[in-house]
Amino acid sequence: MFQKRNFVLRITHRSKFYMGKVIAVCNQKGGTGKTTTAINLAVYLALEERRVLLVDADPQGNATSGLGVDKNVIEKSLYDLLISDEDIASLTHKTAIENLDLVASNIDLIGAEIELVDVDGREGRLKKAIASALDDYDYIIIDCPPSLGLITLNALVATGCVIIPVQCEYYALEGLGQLTNTINLVRDRLNPALEIEGVLLTMADFRTNLTQEVINETRNFFGARVFDTIIPRSIRLSEAPGFGKPIHFYDKSSIGAQKYAALAKEVLTRSEGAAARGGAVVPEDVTAPGGASAPGGAAAAGGTGTSREAATTEQFSVPEEAAVPEEAAVPAPRVEIPQEPEEPVAPCNEGDQAPARD
């Protein structure tokens, strides 16, 4: 565990928000930067003087170890919260970062999937468990497991909104349709307040055409729900968990640290800006391929001023193939024209960008 004396920040400001906002970071596909996003978003919200609770709902316990807590020696974890009706305050760990607490997890959580099968109201156990903590925190961030099992279902029932990290690769698009369908089902049957807070593009390598194609496709489907912040591939982000440190305390000058700081500010603007105006932000209408309106658009909402719930009832399907730019379909001229040399690619800062893959 990293030394507390090196990283404690003295924060005296208390937030004006009295009821915690619960955000689930969710994607059933592994390797999308989900846990990295949950850890660093929680840290930068805490650095913005918000009281934050990070709930590690992944049996791998990576969010726990990523904050410098040894998951192999913790006495009580999220498993006890779900199975034994433990008080959440009794198993909350104070971290080395002021305003950031942790509900840890380890391999024991795998057993909860089996033990909860025959329990009445099993899908609402997490919601019930964290209800007593809503007045103590401004934000509760849930790091979901890379699956659509019972633990993820508990997270979706407990939360009001979902952040979906999407890796800038083609296969990442294929799972979006299944995930959005699951979110729609949970909203219809178990949690009418569930919304997609935003889609976060991660592991972007701007030296490849595929990255730009995935960015374009994702923005075509989700419109204004896609965060402006894009997380690039970063060696520093990959190294930080090995030292049990969030990126801010490992290399706060790296591009990864700067981007997650920007993401936290964007989340604050969306959440608290909308609350200050007395309602949620409904993104402008975006037409998806085939003429369907993207969720949250004006067409889906039935006009301006309608509720956010009505704005997100449209379902989406992800195309089987990445979109081809319209210009590419134009036949090339028969006369050969000398091509201008391509502009050289600007060199990457050492340690921030991983080499481009074939």
Image: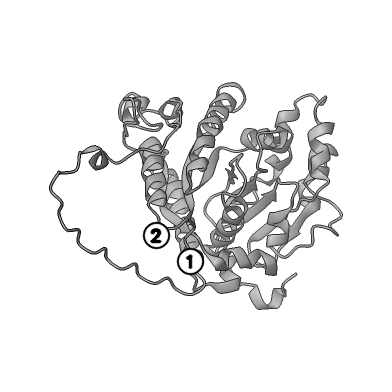
Q: Which residue is mark 1?
A: 353
In the image: residue 237, left or right of residue 300: right
Which residue is drawn at the image coordinates 56% and 73% (left, top)?
251
Viewer-side residue, 201 vs 56: 201
x and y, in percent, of residue 92 in the image: 76, 54
How many marks on residues?
2
Farthest residue to the bottom: give it.
Answer: 6
Quadrant (top left, top right, bottom left, bottom right) of the N terminus: bottom right
Which numbered dot is residue 207?
2
The CA distance from mark 1 to mark 2 is 10 Å
Residue in the foreground of this view, choosing between 273 and 230: 230
Residue 335 at x, y = what percent?
A: 12, 48
Q: Secondary structure at mark 1?
A: loop
Considering every residue shown, the one lying at the far left of the view is: 335
User: Please, which colouring scheme is shown?
Assistant: one colour
Q: Which amino acid is tagged 2?
A: Arg
Callout 1: few (<14), some (14-19), or many (20+) C-alpha neighbours within 10 Å? many
Find residue 162 and report its image quarter.
top right
Q: Which mark's residue is nearer the viewer, 1 or 2?
A: 2
> Residue drawn at (63%, 62%), measured in percent from left and top?
99
Q: Which structural element holds mark 2?
A: loop
Tags 1 and 2 touching, CB below 8 Å: yes
In this rendering, position of residue 310 left or right of residue 132: left
Query: What is the x, y in percent for residue 309?
Result: 46, 28
Who is closer to the viewer here, 15 or 236? 236
